[in-house]
Amino acid sequence: MDNFWKALTVVVAFVASAIAFGNYWVSREKFRMDLFDRRFKVFEAARRLVSYALQEGKVSQEELWTFRAGMIGKEFLFSDVVVTYLDEMDKHAVRAFTHSLAAERQGTMPLTPMQERLREEQSTAVGWLTDQLQQLQRRFAPDMKIRTSRFL
C-alpha cells in the first residue's frame, strides 16, 4: 500500500507539471498575440497617415496628431530599425504639414517665390510619404511576423 501512495504522488506531480507547462504555453501565446495587436495598431496609424497623404495630397493637423498618438510606445514594441523609420516618417509628415500651412497663410494669388518653394517642399514631403505605401509592409514585416510555436 505504501508503494501505491508513492506512485500516486509521482502521477499527481506529473499531472501538475503538465498543467503548469500548459499554463505557461498559453500565457506565452497570449503575450505574443497581445504584442502583435499593439504593433498592428502602430502599423495601422502609419498606414492611415500614408493613405491620407496619398488621397488628399497633404497632411492635416488632425492626421498628424492621430499618427503621433498611435506612435506612443513604439520604442518598446519595435526594433531600432522600425523606430528609426517611424521617426523619419514623422519628420516628413511634420514637414508636409508645416509647409502646406505656411503656403496657405501666404495667400493664393499670385505665388511668390517663397510660396513656390514651400509648396515644392510640401510636395516633396508628401511624395515621400505616398511612396511609403508600398514600403510599409516590407519595413514592418520582420517585427510583425507571428512565429509558429514549436509545441502542439
Image: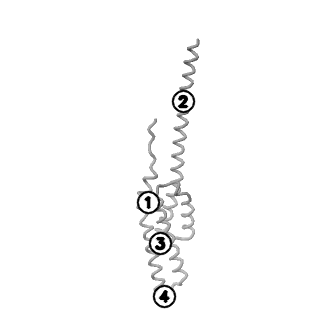
Q: Nearer the viewer, mark 1 or mark 3?
A: 1
Question: Considering the numbered disc 4 on the image, is that residue within a helix, a strand or a loop?
Answer: loop
Query: Which residue is rendered at x = 48% and y = 88% of the image?
Result: 110
Compared to residue 11, the image places residue 129 above or below, namely below
Label 1 to label 3, Cα distance in Å? Answer: 18 Å
Residue marked by disc 2: 17
Tell which circle, 3 or 2, labels the residue nearer the N-terminal end. 2
**How would you rate the neighbour count of disc 1 (Cα within 10 Å): few for under 14, some for 14-19, many for 20 or more?**
some
- Crowd tier of the residue under label 2, counting other residues whose Cα lies within 10 Å: few below 14, some 14–19, many 20 or above: few
> Residue placed at 53% from the left, 39% from the top?
26
Q: Are marks 4 and 1 in contact (CB under 8 Å)?
A: no
Name the residue that disc number 1 marks.
136
SS of the residue at dot 2? helix
Contact? badges 3 and 4 (CB < 8 Å) = no
Amino acid type at mark 1: Leu
| Mark 3–mark 2 distance (CA, rounded to whole Å) | 59 Å
Between tags 2 and 1, which lies in front?
Answer: 2
Name the spot of residue 54 as percent of width and height, x first. 46, 68
Q: Quadrant of residue 130?
A: bottom left
**131 w.r.t. 118: above or below:** above
> Identity of the amino acid at label 3?
Gly
Q: Are marks 2 and 4 in contact (CB under 8 Å)?
A: no
Residue 110: assigned label: 4
